Amino acid sequence: MDFPENLPSSSSDMGRLEQIVSHFFPKALHIVLDSRIPSLQSRGRTRDRNLKKSDKWFNLIMGDRPAALDKLHSWHRNILDSMIIDIILIHPSHHDHAETVIERWVVQYENPLIMSPQSSDPCTRYQKVYKKAIILLRSLYAQTRLLPAYRVSRQLSSSLASSGFEMVYKVSSFSPPVTETMTEFRFSPVEVPPGRLCASVTYRSDLSGFNLGAHITLPPRIITDYVGSPATDPMRFFPSPGQSFEATSSFHGRAGRGPPPSPSERPHSWTSGFHRPPTPNQSFSPQFSPDFHCSRTEHQLSPPFSPSTPRGSNSPRINLRPGTAPVTIPSSATFNRYVSSNFSEPSRNPLPPFSPKSTRRSPSSQDSLPGIALYKSSRSGESPSGLINHYPAHKLTKESKYDSGRFSGLLSSSGSPRFGFSRSPSRLSSDLEDPDCSCPFDFDDVDESSAGLQYSQSLDRRKTSSSISQSLPIGRKSQDAAVGVLVQMLKTAPPLRQDSSTYMASSMSGVQREGSSVSGTESEFSMARSTSDALEELRNYKQLKDLLLSKSKSVGGATRVH
Amino acid sequence: MNCEACNLKELEVESFEVREVLRCILHTIVFHRALGLIRPKDIDLELFDITYVQCGEIEVEKKIDDKIEQIITWIAKHPNKKIQICLTFYEVKTKQPSWFTNKIERLYWEQWNINLNVIQPTKPPVGKSHHSKLVVDPGEEPEELSSRRTLLEQSLQEVLFQIIKFVNEKKDHVPPINDGVIYCPFEITFPSTSDSAFGIDMFKRMLHSGGHPSMLT
């Protein structure tokens, strides 16, 4: 038997058995999340001789385990703690989004008080146990492909218009029981003396109630009155003036979603075909902040709460309160404390980082993100130019320099893969790790580059205007606090993959300069900032600025070509 | 070690669906019995909304595909029949050579019976070609065909669940994993010509195993 950890023969049988148990958990976690969360899928095939020992466990090569998974598992110190993996579907519901646990995987090592008699030869016992554990994981792997959540996850990862649907995960060692009727499947336990490994999955067998089909994966259709695409005529600005705000806001908020066309507008080749009533106020508020939670591919640091939390206050979910300590991965003791406090005091710092989604998610997280709250309160009914006034102008001017440089770069070489750029205005976090966005010819990129071009035009006009710098924010301090909160959030984000794109390189210096200009807030967060954190921050600012600029532009009635 | 047998639920298939259905079932079973170091491969079925897992070994794929070709050829000659395909796993044991037995002995330790009822469609569907890689345009399918397809998809999923359940419940009879062996050796048999020939196949297997397949020492 090819045991990955080549223990010396003198080591105890119990040691090997314990290793089997302790490696079982991360392997199961990897299998489940790999099949549900695209951002955690292993990329590339490692050659067989370069395989890490960890990948050889249970003779199932999954590819490199993403760092996020290692972090997730690092809290699981005590093998007697059960590991509960919740797969949660975020879906539009009434006025907002709702979360529903569609799957719950439970892996635990039960340690009975009475030890079962050891009947078999100790030397071969661990081999038999290992063999059975391998079979168990094989069936778990196959089961992940059979359950309905797999198809949903595939649809969401490949669909052009996700329409508010997202799949996130939460890993914990305690979760409240799920209230909906779910089907349970228990894998046969594997006896691993002195206890046994158990795995089970509880799942919703019918996901038709979420109406996924209506919003996802529209079949390709032929546009009979094709008007061309941004690729052919980059300088054309397609959406109508009334539409532009809609376009930019939706572009900002949702990954992979094109601007929803107004009913009067012809569908273009680069629209996703997803239709929504274009109401600027309504669409903006859920869409701006979900800039954070728009993508399943982001690595976020704290899990969404269970569906039982009140809809209106998402504060329990978000750990972005000013002054909150940076989220770290605690030991299991700390974790258990978090868990117990999680449900008794929703306002406290929530669980340690698991599903990274909810740090960014905030359809209604007004209280926890004052900067965004500022946006939203001024949003409703106000002109976009009012928003611009709230934004620190110095950031705008600085960023516009970078943006225009980058955008012009895009315009000049539209064929080259600039996914690092094309994604950034639309996402606030580590998109670069999203495999889907690495393809320059992906449909999503076309959508976003088109909206990005809108930004570029607005920026080019803005660059020379000095009106922004004059109309400085009145509430400067609160804005700084908001910025500080954003910085905090970004700091706790996992580091970006250090791609060698010029975009990143040029942005670094910009971030440093901008950091120094934010007075008062930077001193509060004097922790070491990595380059990737700064990059995140820069992208954040850029997005905010882009949004503001586009809003002001649309209201300013700049000439558009349609 | 005894030989465990599992009878899978019967599936009603049309001849053009046989390939995908068999590939799905056979690969799923072999995946659970490929206990060596493998890199699993997810395969999406074209005709159904199902994803199954292959063990990723080329030899296995080739062996299964070859056997499926034989089965399809047989089905073409024997339309509208029920067919049972047996996938059996065996251990290769070397025995003391004596004058009447072979040196190599196969000990069958598991048998899977895949039951298919191959039906002919009542009328040839419009626009379909009876090619192996068939993508059916759902828009052209009449309602009864699509409902039959949906039923078949559900049944196929049930069969896959059945496999997973069986694999979970019975683990003790699986022989130990030898170093360097990726998958447990297996063979696929089906009635090749007629019922009497099926008996000959069974007799051959009995000779190989040196006894009744269900009574192995």
Image (spheres, coloured by chain):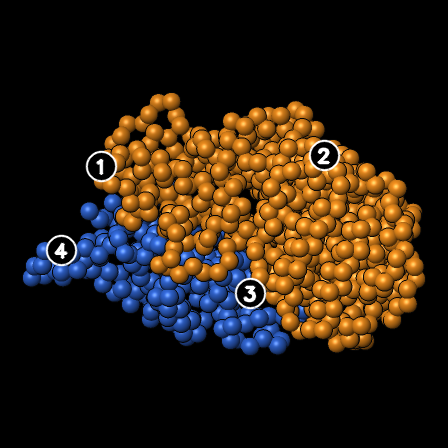
User: Looking at the figure, which quarter contains the C terminus of chain A?
Assistant: bottom right
Residue A91: image x %, image y %? 71, 46
Q: Label 2 lies in what chain?
A: A
Q: CA distance from mark 1 to mark 3?
A: 54 Å
The colour assigned to chain A within the rendered structure: orange
Check disc 4 and report its element: helix, strand or loop: loop
Q: Earlier in the sequence, mark 1 or mark 2?
A: 1
Q: Which residue is mark 2?
A: A322
How many numbered markers are drawn? 4
Q: Which residue is mark 4?
A: B95
Residue A178: image x %, image y %? 61, 34
Looking at the picture, which amino acid does disc 2 mark?
Answer: Pro
Q: Label 4 lies in what chain?
A: B
Q: CA distance from mark 2 to mark 4?
A: 75 Å
The chain letter of the blue chain reads B
Looking at the picture, which amino acid does disc 1 mark?
Answer: Ser
Q: Label 1 lies in what chain?
A: A
Badge 2: how crowded within 10 Å, few (<14), some, or many (20+)? some
For the residues beneath circles 2 and 4, the answer to whether they share a chain is no
Q: Which residue is mark 1?
A: A10
> From the viewer's perspective, is the residue at label 3 or at label 2 nearer?
2
> From the viewer's perspective, is the residue at label 1 or at label 3 nearer?
1
Q: Which residue is mark 3?
A: B47
Please tell me in which quadrant of the rendered image residue A27 appears: top left
Cβ–Cβ below 8 Å for labels 4 and 3?
no
**Which mark identifies residue A194?**
none
Foreground residue among A451 and A188? A451
Q: Label 3 lies in what chain?
A: B
Residue at 80% across, 68% down: A267
Foreground residue among A462 and B159? A462
Cβ–Cβ below 8 Å for labels 4 and 1?
no
